[in-house]
Image (cartoon, grey):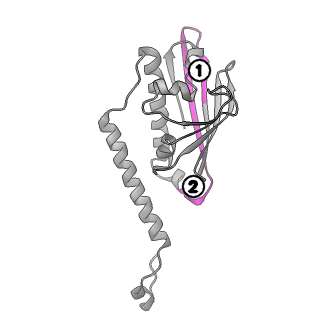
Amino acid sequence: VRREVVIRGGADEIFALACPVAELDWVDDWHFDLVYSESGRNEDNNLLLEPVTGLAVLRSAGSETYWYTTLYDTDRRRFHAVLLTRDVILGKWQFEVDDLGDGRGRLRLRITYTGLTEEGNRIIGERGFEDRMGNMLEFILTSAKSYLETGKIFRLARKRKMELAISLIGATIGRHFRRRAAGRRPTVSERRGGTMAA
């Protein structure tokens, strides 16, 4: 999934947003645990753990995501990371900024996911998965643009946060019942009647 936006601001200023510490200032409800960083900020081999991406991807509580920075190039304004959500899905994250030369920059985001298990492949194949990823990227782009152009953090409306929470609860319950149905044993009456539930 790819998205991009043009932002009024210098390319270096836009690229400076590509740091988990900086994101505390411009991403609504962002929080993380920094596992490893020599500088305390984003850099090659930086490792952090956060809960938000896993919720968006798996729609399951407790699905924290590790972010491992594979490229942090300030000269070319490129930040790439590998994302591991549980042992289910592996992602590649790309945050790249182009200098448009007129006091504006283009922020390009791309995320690519690969399932590591049958569950991961099923989640990626779900109707609406790409839309969820697109919405996540749109939120990040809108947040970056708002912060750099107005100085204010873009906040999701309380109603939208409630809708997302309800959607998450519904998805979690649905997944629980699908797992139980897939692994359930036939009842005594089903065995006696010679029928097996699918």
Query: In the rendered image, which residue does mark 1 sit on?
Result: 15
Q: Looking at the picture, how far across and down is residue 51, in whole percent?
A: 50, 42
Could you tell me the amino acid type at mark 2?
Asn
Q: Looking at the picture, how far across and down is residue 183, in whole percent?
A: 50, 72
Of all residues, the one furthest to the left in this rendering is 159
Q: For this rendering, which residue is in front, 38 or 90? A: 38
Neighbour tally class for label 1: few under 14, some 14-19, many 20 plus, Cα within 10 Å? many
Distance of label 1 from label 2 (alpha carbons): 32 Å
Q: Is residue 154 above or below residue 167?
A: above
Q: Residue at x 58, y 38 (%)?
A: 111
Quarter location, residue 10: top right
Q: Residue at x 47, y 36 (%)?
A: 136
The overriding secondary structure of the stretch rendered in magenta is: strand
Query: In the rendered image, which residue does mark 2 sit on?
Result: 121
Q: Is residue 60 above or below residue 12?
A: below
Of all residues, the one furthest to the bottom in this rendering is 192
Q: Which residues are magenta?
A: 95-122
Left or right of residue 188: residue 22: right
Q: Looking at the picture, how far across and down is residue 166, in whole percent?
A: 34, 48
